[in-house]
Image (cartoon, helix red, strand yellow):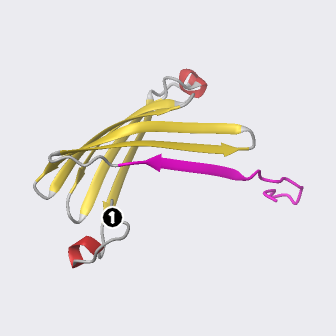
Amino acid sequence: NESSTGAKAALPIRYSIQAGLKIVGEKIDVSPNIYTNVQGGNAYVAGGFLFDYKVDVSKISLGVWYITRDAIAACVGYSHTKFSLMYSYDVMATSPVGSASTSLGAHEVTLMVYFNRAETKGVKVIPSF
């Protein structure tokens, strides 16, 4: 029951499936991915590619995503051994909300800090693909 007033308001079960892989190259890695989410008769599907260009112990990432009936997103990022910084911009050109909105899209910034990574301690991570 998801009601804040005490009324009966059942929340339908959400089903999610994610799939992707990483194609590792000498200088460039390619990661195609797809994500789907179904809840209460509504479906959401997102698919895209992330390209990583390796420079010494760092990498530069570029990506593009399509979200059904909603948006097209582009991202750029930088990763080092201790952190990653990613910027994403969603153009809501395909969304009915986007056509009614006065803004052109949404910005997202992600900072990830890595603590005690197994690879830096010589630990073999299983499964290793």
Q: Is residue 48 above or below residue 17?
A: above
Residue 56 horizontal/vertical position (percent): 10, 55
Looking at the rendered structure, the kind of residue marked 1 is: Ser
19 relative to 32 in the view: left or right: right
107 relative to 124 in the view: left or right: right
96 relative to 83 in the view: left or right: right
Secondary element at image label 1: loop
Q: How many numbered marks have been drawn onto this rendered protein structure?
A: 1
Foreground of the two, 12 or 3: 12
Residue drawn at x 81%, y 56% as measured from the top left: 3
Residue 80 horizontal/vertical position (percent): 20, 59
Name the residue carrying label 1. Answer: 128
> In the rendered structure, does residue 61 fall within the stretch colored magenta?
no
Q: Is residue 98 above or below residue 51?
A: above
- Identify the residue at the far left of this view: 56
Q: Quadrant of the C terminus?
A: bottom left
- Identify the residue at the far right of this view: 7
Residue drawn at x 89%, y 55% as measured from the top left: 8
- Asked whether residue 10 is in view, the answer is yes
Using a 10 Å C-alpha cutoff, classify the residue at mark 1 as few (fewer than 14 neighbours), some (14 to 19) or many (20 or more): few
- Asked whether residue 117 is in view, the answer is no
Which residues lie in the magenta part?
1-21
Q: Is residue 62 above or below residue 55?
A: above
Residue 7 horizontal/vertical position (percent): 89, 56
Residue drawn at x 82%, y 59% as measured from the top left: 1
Residue 104 horizontal/vertical position (percent): 44, 27
Foreground of the two, 20 or 61: 20
Prevailing secondary structure of the magenta residues: loop
Q: Is residue 100 above or below residue 105?
A: above
> In the rendered structure, does residue 18 fall within the stretch colored magenta?
yes
Residue drawn at x 33%, y 49% as measured from the top left: 22
